[in-house]
Each structure stands twice: as structure tokens, then as C-alpha cells.
Image (cartoon, rainbow, N blue to C red):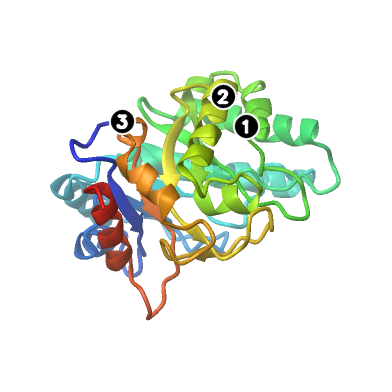
Amino acid sequence: MVENDIGPRIGAHKSIAKSIDLAVDRGVQSTCECLQIFTRPPRRWDVPQLSPEATQNFVQKSRAANYYDTAIHMPYLPNLASPDDTLFEKSVKVLHEEVEKMVLLQVPYVITHLGSPKNQDERFAAKRVADALNRVREYIKDPSMILLENSTAKRKKWGNKIEHFEKILGHVQEEQYVGICLDTAHAYSSGYDISTSEGLNEVIDLIEAQIGKDKLRLIHINDSKGKLGSGIDHHEHIGKGYIGLDCFRELMQNPRFKRLPMILETPKDDNICDKENLELLRRLRSGE
């Protein structure tokens, strides 16, 4: 991880429509300092191969834009905690493919949700996810990592608590290749009150105490349409939801977050664009 002299690097998730390298162009147009992408349509299993030309263009454009901490987000269909062996094997295959693309595109992170164990318990889920991580370990090249993202899990109580990450890491063979992505909206709707600077720092302290000081590698920086503990997974524009500005001001100004890339996953609508959210975050970062 590389530190920014003026605070954390901020960016957004961008579309790869027409060609994966165009995501970099869209990031630059939106004034992103870092980037997140899907490498395939997020709700499809089948996916076309990346062409050598598009891959080379992505790498070259990323270097020119100084996007050295780009993250690939796993698609939505895989379930790494599934008790269904067929679905689990299919999900591990996708994880393997995304890790290979991480190496091919020369980016450091693949982000995955923890899936759902359906009627199985947390012990089963933790071992299942760890098994998937262990099986793709040999394909990860230093200094790349797989990042586990917290979820809301309103009905299935899995993936929404910090201790779930600790349980998974307890079964991972080489945990130096596994880190954490904290989604602010998911954390808030799961009952972690990060709306104040004190509450946010308490959650980060808990992550560091239970998982490790170097494990938090990226933050999905989203406000929440759902109230505290509601379990509602609806993201909102920065400062327009129930989390409010104090949390984001703390993320922008506290030196402990300076090394972390932060990615917007705020709504793509006609009211507020990524550029406006980023401009607000920059104002907070500058001391407002």
C-alpha cells in the first residue's frame, strides 16, 4: 500500500462496457484517484475472454493514471459458503478466474462477499470460505491479496460481523494473502454505529484487535439508505443517508486511514454523479 500525502486515495467503481480499458478512461473523467471494476457482467456465469489488446491497454492506461491499487470485485452469483457442492465448485472456479485476471491486469486486489451457508452454521461457513481461499492460493502473486467484504445478511446471519472474518482466517493456510474490505453502508446497517468519529474508530479498533492491524486494505465508502441495524443493503450518496458526514470526515482526515484506497459504490443516477461525491470527499479531506 502507498500513502497519499494529502489523505486517502478516493475513487469509484467504473463500468467496463465495450472494453475493460475504458473503465480507466471513465475513472479519469470522474476524477478518480483509484478504481474498482468487474471483469465480467456481475449477474452472468459465462464471460468472454479478455483480449490481449484490451489487457495491454488496461495496464498501460492504469499506469498513466497512477491507478496502482485497483480492485476487481467478484460477480454476484458465486457463493463461497454454499453447502451445495455443485454451486460451491462453480463459485471456486470463478474465484480462480478472477485471481488469474488480477495477475493478468497487474492489480493488487480481488474483493469477494462471504456468500450464504443457507441452513448450515457459522463453523461450516467459515471452513467452506477458507477452503475456497486455500484452493486458489497458489495462483496469487505477491503482493496481491483476496479481500473479504462484510455484508448486511439480514436473514442469514453470516458475513455481517467482524468475528466471521476471524473464524475464516483461523482456517486459512496462508493468511498473509487474505485481507479485509470494509463497506461502510453494510457495517452501519448490520448494527455497527459508525456515524460518529468515536464509533468509527471503535469498529476499526475491533478489526485490528480481532483480525490484525494490517488486514484492512480497502474501504467501500458509501452512505446508507437503511437505518442502524436495519439489515437493508441500499447505498446512498455521501452525506445523504443515515450515516451522515461525520464518519466520512473522519475517514478523510484521520491519519490512520491515510494508506487506504476508498471506493465509492454510491447510486448511479441523474441526481448526483461520482464526480460530485468525490468533490465532497475532497473538501472533507482538505479540512472542511
Find the residue positioned furthest to the left: 64
Q: Nearer the viewer, residue 54 or 260?
A: 260
Measure how far apart labels 3 and 2 are at the Cα level.
18 Å
Q: Is residue 104 above or below residue 123?
A: below
Looking at the picture, which amino acid does disc 3 mark?
Met
Labels 3 and 2: the sequence-earlier one: 3
Q: Tell me the element at label 2.
A: loop
Q: For numbered disc 1, what is the local secondary structure?
A: helix
What residue would you read off at disc 2? 211
Q: Is residue 97 visible?
A: no
Q: Nearer the viewer, residue 245 or 58?
A: 245
Secondary structure of the residue carrying numbered label 3: loop
The number of numbered badges drawn on the structure is: 3
Characterize the local packing of mark 3: few (<14), some (14-19) or many (20 or more) Cα atoms within 10 angstroms.
few
Name the residue carrying label 3: 1
Q: Residue at x 63, y 47 (%)?
A: 91
Sequence-first disc among 2 and 1: 1
Alpha carbon distance from label 2 to label 1: 7 Å
Nearer-the-camera pick, 239 or 110:
239
Q: Decide if residue 185 is in sight here.
A: yes
Identify residue type, mark 2: Ile
> Dot 2: few (<14), some (14–19), or many (≥20) neighbours within 10 Å?
many
Residue 90 at x, y percent in the picture: 65, 48
Q: Crowdedness of circle 1 by 10 Å Cα count: few (<14), some, many (20+)?
A: many
Q: Is residue 246 left or right of residue 65?
A: right
Q: Residue at x 65, y 61 (%)?
A: 232
Q: Amino acid at mark 1?
A: Phe
Q: Could you say which disc has been placed on residue 165 in the image?
A: 1
**Which quadrant of the view contains residue 63?**
top left
The residue sitting at 54% across, 33% down in the picture is 202
Sequence-first disc among 1 and 3: 3
The answer to whether the residue labelled 2 contacts the one labelled 1, judged by CB atoms less than 8 Å apart, is yes
